Amino acid sequence: FFSDGSIWRPRNSREKLQKHLYATGGKVFTRFPPEPNGYLHVGHAKAMFVDFGLAQETGGYCYLRYDDTNPDAEKLEYIEHIQEIIGWMGWKPFKVGFDDASLFLYHTFFSNNVFECNGSDSFVLEMQITFSSDYFQELYDLAVQLIKRGHAYVDHQTSDEIKEYREKKLDSPWRDRPVAESLKLFDDMRRGMIEEGKATLRMKQDMKNDNFNMYDLIAYRIKFTTHPHAGDKWCIYPSYDYTHCIVDSLENITHSLCTLEFESRRASYYWLLEALDMYLPYVWEYSRLNVSNTVLSKRKLNRLVTENWVDGWDDPRLMTLAALRRRGASPEALNAFCRGVGITRSDNIIRMDLLEHFIRDDLNKNARRSMVIITNFKDSVVEELEAKSWPEGKDGDPSSTYKVPLTRVVYIEKSDFRLVNSKEFYGLSPGKSVLLRYAYPIKCIDVIFKENTQEVIEIHAEYDQAKTTKPKGVLHWVAEPSAGVDPLKIEVRLFDKLFLSENPGELDDWLADLNPNSKVVIEDALAVPALKHAKIGDKFQFERIGYFCVDRDTTAEKLVFNRTVTLRSSYPK
Ligand code: ATP
Ligand code: MG
Ligand code: MG
């Protein structure tokens, strides 16, 4: 091993990678290794972009591997959701299988496990999802080998003692016990003969190293917990540090890509594989994705959900992929965002408006237009007009227009009327004309106030049937019920950032930073009747208001819309 600063690599690792690539027919094998302890978030979209994306770009393969070594936090619900949302993101995990006739895998633990080809190079592909827990038996057998080779020992220190000894760089009193004793005790651990917390298996690494992640990391601990995938078979579970590198090696991963917090664990990764004489994947780290005004850590997301600070894992204010989908973001937008952010090794916080920019950009091309009013007004005829569903048309879409009834009374937004006109105001004012979008110019000729107040309840206007006036301002509007056409009553949910400060995860009392106005519900918005055929997940631009998506809370009686993003960024530049 050599060390350049904090970055450790085994000698000749690049040459070894080249050799291995030769043996895999030049194919890149990666893996995306989520722990099924929560829903995936936008940070995982980046990890998938890296893992699946590299494999795709090079014609290689990427496994979905559930890194399920901690049964306390893991659940079947998460396992199922993760698979579904990866598919939604557009990624396909593949396994490389072997057609016995043409290829075989030369794969023993104590010689290098590499592929050997004899003639043809036809890989057999099948969708593949693996679980670290599927390798529990191999992992156990390898641990026995590790003990036999003198590289692991059963320890009885408590977690506090381990911590204290690590700080002092001191050996555990059990570090040099005979191999036979460790073998016997490890077997006792496996058979459930030792109580939880009374023994661990530790790797015999380097207590004097500069890197604290070489201080005899724990390989196995006792847990009398049922595992969501492996069931009740085991009462000892391998640690992340012990498992990840071995499973990478067993799966012939060529590029093991992970986030920077694992950098200091790379030394242990290579140490263990060398100690077992196993094939060494090439490890490389990149920076985690952080997004402003939100939290991404699954531990924090879990608290928000279980303590009901938000309404479930897919609450549209969260940055989980399920939430972003519900809010109306498309996988294309999220992947474009990942590409835009790039893969680097420098840590920073990406502003929420950059994510919104990519979502908006995609919706601008893909969301139908519709007119909706969030509050109210008045005046007109009875006529059916045509409005455009797509500003520039849309190839082959028969419904490129929709019908808009115009009646004597129409509603406009409250904010689109002012008693006192001004230069920068494009709305309606006494004596002024505006264009009702897709209809006629109207001119305000009178204003009716609520008795003894300044509150405007009616605006009287004349319409210009010949369309001779060309007003600057163009307003959206909906018609009052008349001649059998009702404006549609819909519920609209407007979302804002979930946290007030940019980096809430850093705060001691991060929950106190929640934005009390992150969700506003308007139960009586009005929309054009054509919208009533909208289905859950459909996306629209409500003209002049924003991009909206039909929420899954929609019922036969009531359509519910989530605002995905506003039309323009509302963030200060
Ligand atoms: P969390 O702290 O959110 O629980 P994690 O790293 O424990 O994150 P895993 O499910 O174990 O979550 O991660 C699966 C993969 O996704 C890992 O390779 C991890 O490095 C990567 N990943 C997790 N969070 C991010 C992020 N914010 N940005 C980029 N990659 C991430
Ligand atoms: Mg993890
Ligand atoms: Mg985690």
Image (cartoon, rainbow, N blue to C red):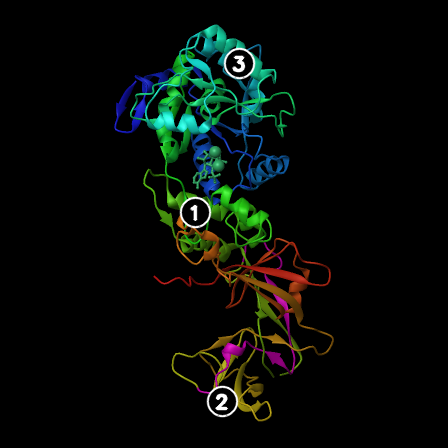
Nearer to me, 510 or 249: 510
Foreground mark, 3 or 1, reads 3
Numbered label attached to residue 430: 2
Disc nearer the start of the sequence (1/2): 1
- Is 395 colored magenta in this rendering? yes
Quarter holding the N terminus is top left
- Is 515 colored magenta in this rendering? no
Residue 98: image quadrant is: top right
Q: CA distance from mark 1 to mark 2?
A: 46 Å
Residue 386 in the image: state x and y as whole percent: 61, 69
Residue 295 in the image: state x and y as whole percent: 46, 48
Q: Which residue is at the far left?
A: 4
Badge 2 crowding class, 10 Å Cα cut-off, few under 14, some 14 to 19, many 20 or more, is some
Numbered label attached to residue 186: 3
Nearer to me, 293 or 199: 199
| Residue at horizontal 48 percent and vertical 48 percent from the top | 333
- Left/right of residue 530 with respect to residue 108 in the rendered view: right
Find the magenta span and give its range.
394-420
Residue 286 visible from this viewpoint: yes
Amino acid type at circle 1 is Phe
Instruction: Say which element carries label 2.
Output: loop
